[in-house]
Image (tube, helix red, strand yellow):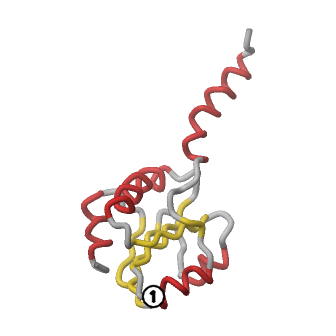
Amino acid sequence: MLSKLQKVLLVAATLLAPSLAAWAGQPFDAEAFQSAQAAEKVILVDVAAPWCPTCRQQRPIVEQIEREKPDLVVFDVDFDTAKEVLKQFHVQYQSTLILFRGTREVGRSIGETDPTLIRSLIAKAF
């Protein structure tokens, strides 16, 4: 028989488990990012936190676009741990999406969860 505390912890773990799953994009790596820029790739930098509900809403949209656009390179930046990367990109908030075409930033959004608007942002670079 589970105690009340054990039941609460079990429910909490069940609810948090999906947010702990790895993002589909690759973890941000400065060298890989610079290589993608040099190759004039379309790059999406996805700044997210596992505890962020807006980030969780953005994630399936970004994943779907990744499947549809194999030329899109997605780098995931952990808002809680990648402070130097946040400074590099002048990011103050989680749920920030930054779009590049090569070395040029072509768009940015913060907290956007409308699939049409996220698709429009990414379309700017193609």
Residue sticking out furthest to the top: 1
Q: Which residue has dot 1 on it?
A: 39
Q: Nearer the viewer, residue 92 or 20?
A: 20
Q: Using the image, determine if residue 51 lies above or below residue 99.
A: above
- Residue 57 in the image: state x and y as whole percent: 41, 51
- List x then y, in percent, for residue 16: 60, 39
Counting every numbered tag in the picture gives 1
Q: Decide: is 59 above or below 86.
A: above
The C terminus lies in quadrant: bottom left
Q: Residue at x 73, y 14 (%)?
A: 2
Q: Horizontally, is 86 left or right of 104 in the view?
A: right
* Side (left or right) of 33 relative to 82: left
| Percent of width and height locating residue 118 | 32, 65
Residue appearing at x 56%, y 35% in the figure: 15
Using the image as rendered, state which of residue 39 and residue 62 is in the foreground: 39
Residue at 69%, 28% in the rendered image: 9
Q: Residue at x 41, y 62 (%)?
A: 111
Quarter of the picture containing the N terminus is: top right
Q: Nearer the viewer, residue 87 or 33?
A: 33
Residue 107 occupies which quadrant of the picture? bottom left
Q: Residues within 10 Å of mark 1 (few under 14, many from 20)?
A: few
Seen in the picture, residue 38 relative to 20 is either above or below; the reply is below
- Name the side, left or right, on which 11 lies relative to 93: right
Q: Position of residue 41 (x, y in %)?
A: 41, 82
Image quadrant where residue 4 sits: top right
Q: Secondary structure at mark 1?
A: loop
Give the amino acid at mark 1.
Ala
